[in-house]
Image (spheres, rainbow, N blue to C red):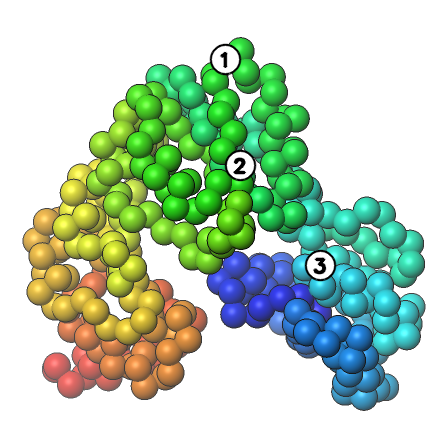
């Protein structure tokens, strides 16, 4: 697999996990997968050729059954060097959404896989959850990468103009966009497309819900509407060190599950867990390894979570977690 862009992004990690799981399901666990990354080149020509030479030397004499390119940079690199590095090997390019899929290219032959967008389905879901909706704010960015999805939305959502008012908020500076969305008119909803850059070339690097309570107070009350439509599905609220507090989570009365997520290190205490459990919430904690923390930090936090009585821990190392839990149980006995 040849990746373009940053390997540390959570979205890339999810795509990598899904591809590997699907390949293992189809071809078994003996599959031999190698991974390389094409960074965003600063000295483009020099670095591109250095990467070409590195891959040629590293994999000299090794036969591959398929090469998977993920993201634009990787696909472009393989268009230039795929034939010389991997002669006669099929190439599949993962393009994300269909709006970002490259045009058909036969040099070298490359199959393109993408997610088919269903923007009308997304709007139908909004109207089902909030049938009183009269206006939908469609949010798009100013970056070139934001434009394909915006164009698709304008075309695919045009038939809804007689049913609901569509207001396009395109390329607004981030602060202006935040102010606009914080003061929506009654019976309004938001359809978020892609915003990687505003009009002032300001960028949204990490998006989060600043105040769940504010959104819950808007007409429609999304979580409660979802509960009416799907009464058997449990709803989770997250607490984290990114401004999502225990009090906020407890104010979402339909959320029976709490997702405890610490991005930058331990921030919650045994008292917080007891407060949530006293309110009748189930608690599932995110292990530090999912945020790149070292093994020792994981073990120490696992011991805290187990002693505090959380209902589950999400980790990439379940066997190690089970060993720690058994050792703690033996000590207690």
Mark 1, Cα crowd under 10 Å, few <14 / some 14-19 / many 20+, is few
User: Mark 2, mark 3: which one is toward the viewer?
Assistant: 2
> What residue is drawn where x is 53% and y is 45%?
199
Of pointers 1 and 3, the one earlier in the residue sequence: 3
**What x and y, as percent, mark residue 283?**
22, 57
Spatial separation of the CA atoms under disc 1 and disc 3: 37 Å
Quarter of the figure with the N terminus: bottom right
Q: Which mark is residue 163?
A: 1
Spatial separation of the CA atoms under disc 1 and disc 2: 21 Å
**Is residue 35 in sight in this rendering?**
yes
User: Mark 1, mark 2: which one is toward the viewer?
Assistant: 2
The residue identified by callout 3 is: 72
Q: Is residue 73 left or right of residue 266?
A: right
> What residue is drawn where x is 47% and y is 16%?
164
Q: Is residue 36 left or right of residue 186?
A: right
> What residue is drawn where x is 36% and y is 51%?
208
**Is residue 69 in sight in this rendering?**
no
Tag 3's secondary structure? helix
The residue identified by callout 2 is: 170
Spatial separation of the CA atoms under disc 2 and disc 3: 24 Å
Tag 2's secondary structure? strand
Judge by depth and name the residue closer to the eye, 329 or 310: 310
**What x and y, as percent, mark residue 98?**
68, 43
Mark 2, Cα crowd under 10 Å, few <14 / some 14-19 / many 20+, is many
Judge by depth and name the residue closer to the eye, 63 or 76: 76
Above or below residue 103? Residue 34 is below
Of pointers 2 and 3, the one earlier in the residue sequence: 3
Of pointers 1 and 2, the one earlier in the residue sequence: 1
Q: Which corner quadrant of the image does residue 119 belong to?
A: top right
Tag 1's secondary structure? loop
């Amino acid at each position: 697999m040849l990746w373009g862009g940053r390997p540390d992004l959570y979205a890339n990690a999810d795509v990598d996990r899904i591809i590997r799981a699907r390949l293992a399901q189809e071809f078994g666990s003996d599959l031999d997968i190698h991974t390389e990354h094409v960074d965003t080149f600063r000295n483009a020509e020099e670095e591109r050729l250095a990467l070409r030479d590195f891959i040629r030397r590293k994999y000299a004499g090794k036969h591959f059954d398929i090469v998977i390119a993920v993201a634009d940079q990787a696909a472009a690199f393989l268009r230039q060097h795929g034939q010389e590095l991997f002669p006669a090997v099929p190439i599949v390019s993962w393009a994300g959404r269909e709006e970002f899929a490259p045009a058909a290219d036969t040099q070298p032959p490359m199959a393109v896989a993408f997610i088919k967008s269903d923007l009308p389905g997304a709007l139908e879901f909004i109207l089902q959850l909030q049938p009183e909706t009269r206006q939908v704010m469609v949010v798009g960015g100013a970056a070139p990468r934001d434009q394909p999805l915006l164009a698709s939305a304008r075309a695919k959502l045009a038939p809804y103009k007689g049913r609901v008012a569509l207001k396009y908020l395109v390329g607004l500076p981030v602060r202006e966009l935040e102010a606009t969305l914080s003061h929506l008119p009654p019976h309004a909803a938001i359809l978020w497309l892609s915003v990687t850059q505003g009009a002032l070339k300001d960028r949204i690097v990490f998006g989060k819900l600043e105040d769940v309570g504010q959104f819950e107070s808007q007409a429609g009350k999304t979580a409660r509407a979802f509960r009416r439509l799907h009464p058997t599905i449990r709803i989770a609220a997250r607490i984290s060190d990114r401004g999502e507090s225990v009090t906020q989570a407890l104010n979402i009365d339909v959320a029976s599950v709490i997702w405890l997520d610490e991005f930058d290190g331990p921030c919650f205490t045994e008292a917080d867990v007891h407060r949530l459990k006293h309110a009748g919430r189930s608690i599932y904690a995110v292990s530090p390894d999912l945020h790149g923390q070292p093994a020792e930090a994981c073990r120490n936090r696992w011991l805290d979570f187990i002693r505090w009585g959380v209902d589950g821990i999400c980790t990439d190392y379940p066997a190690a977690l089970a060993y720690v839990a058994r050792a703690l149980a033996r000590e207690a006995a």
